[in-house]
Amino acid sequence: MATVTAPTAEPGTTTGPARANRRSDRARSEERLGWMLAGPAFVVMVAVTGYPMLRAVYQSLFSYRITAPDEREFIGLKNYTTVLTDSLWWTDVGTTVFITVVTVLIELVIGFAFASVMHRLVFGRRTVRTSILVPYGIITVVAAYAWQYAFALDSGFVNNWFGLDDFAWFSQRWSAIAVIILAEVWKTTPFISLLLLAGLAQVPVELGEAAKVDGATWWQRLSRVTLPNMKPAIMVALLFRTLDAYRIFDTVFIMTGGAQDTETVSFLAYRQVISRTEIGLGSAVSVLLFLTVVLIAFLFIKGFKTDLSQVRGNQ
Amino acid sequence: MKTRRSSAGWAIACVFIVFYALFPVLWILSMSFKTGDDINNGKFLPSNWSWDNYDTVFDTSLFTSALRNSIGVSAISTIVSVFLATLAAYAIARLNFRGKRLILSLALAIAIFPTVALISPLFDMWRSLGLYDTWLGLILPYLSFTLPLSIWVLSAFFREIPWEMEQAAQVDGATAWQAFRKVIVPLAAPGVFTAAIITFFFAWNDFAFGISLTASERARTVPAALAFFTGESFFQQPTAAIAAASVVVTIPVIALVLVFQRKIVAGLTSGAVKG
């Protein structure tokens, strides 16, 4: 922070010493102000995420249980081999990936449909937007309870309405996962539809009209004009929702508690640390969870060329 | 003819979206008024509407203390987070300083960070630092997880502000700070509101930290307390009581959405619209 500008700022070395000097003073004070303003946020972010994550990496190299602190010993990468050779880990990864992919695909379609409706709405705009923000703002745990009670054998109305008698949704793996996905889709579609709505607003109206004049069908206009022009918005919405869906925890915790092989990776990490107090093993799961998320983000940014600088229109 | 048919189509689409968004909320509301045998009547509505569950909930210290904790922790997190994010976003949008890219990449990294991965190190650290089961122990992670998005939203807003106005203010003798406070802050207010609401929703919604970093009524927040209703403190089935508690904590969300609907949507969309 102390050394600021290039040596050209020294008086006499350039053709315009006074000007260069002034600029360097300005640059220096700007730099100081910049760190004064952004510093506190930076420190909080590093202290509560960066440092603990490094600590988790360190802890993951030990066999360490809170209930037996004296038996803590360095075991290298053994926690990782334990996790990666356990079929439970791979079942959980499979469940998480399945929930993520299905959830994101369904809500991309519904979200786009909602965005198209909201985009063209003239009347009732306020009502629609207000109501769509309710699932977005509602507590995930509350949403999970609402859907669980709706499908439950005792308190639910779903079986009654659809004549399913005593079909126990939560005692089979796939039906439980279906309800989990339903709850997730309901809760997070508004977010994706608002991002897509922003993307729709970026598509020049003239393009669609020109295509219409030229006789393009509804589908041609959608696939050749609207969607390509929305690509940045779609990719960003996909990236954020995929990462978010992969972290799924609350809904599973409330609905099934991880029973019937519905446990997700986040839930596994939680269970190792909090229920079993296995700090070492839990840290290894946490680090693996983190690495998976980094990998997904990397695939999106490099593989699908998701340009994050385009998120909010600063192209 | 065609326009009339299509406008009827739009009206149906609207009604469908509203129904989609509110249906589960109405269900949990209806559930919260059920008592006794009604709870398992397999119907959407109760046959007997009753406020009993609300009485039960507000008589339970597990819930009232959780409500107090949730309100306190969320409010403090929101105010501090938005304040810090506003300063940082201004610096990022307006000033040239080294480390800017570092801050932005860090913010991005945290935005994609899996929250649960932090439970293990924070659980361990907070216990040794005495932050376990305290408000501060929750506020700190909430801050660091909401700062990135707030910085993001706010710097997008700051970039669109007509900067000639700030320069004009500085030409007229205002300092950089005055130009920031008097010119930029009012223009950026919609962005600040958006950031505040998103932050509040995050803190209000959080469950993972709430159950792992608290142990008692001292700091346990509502989402975590809801999960612990089961089997504890209720002789009867807790279903309807949980529904009533759920309705209570959904009221602030609906109130915020009703009052700030335009600001939330504007905050999420305007940056992209202006391009």
Image (cartoon, rainbow, N blue to C red):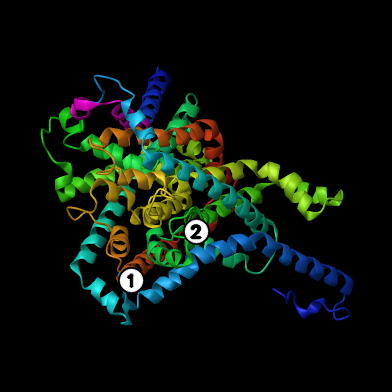
Residue at which label 2 appears: A307
Q: Is residue B112 visible?
A: yes
Label 2: chain letter: A
- State the image quarter where residue B45 is shown: top left
- State the image quarter where residue A284 is shown: bottom left
Q: Is residue A299 above or below residue A169?
A: below
Magenta range: B22-41
Q: Is residue B171 left or right of residue A47?
A: right
Residue sitting at 27 percent across and 64 percent down? A276
Q: CA distance from mark 2 to mark 1?
A: 31 Å
Residue at which label 1 appears: A284
Q: Is residue A262 left or right of residue A21?
A: left
Query: Viewer-proximal residue, A61 or B8?
Result: A61
Q: Amino acid at mark 1?
A: Ala
> Is B28 covered by the magenta stretch?
yes
Q: Is residue B272 visible?
A: no
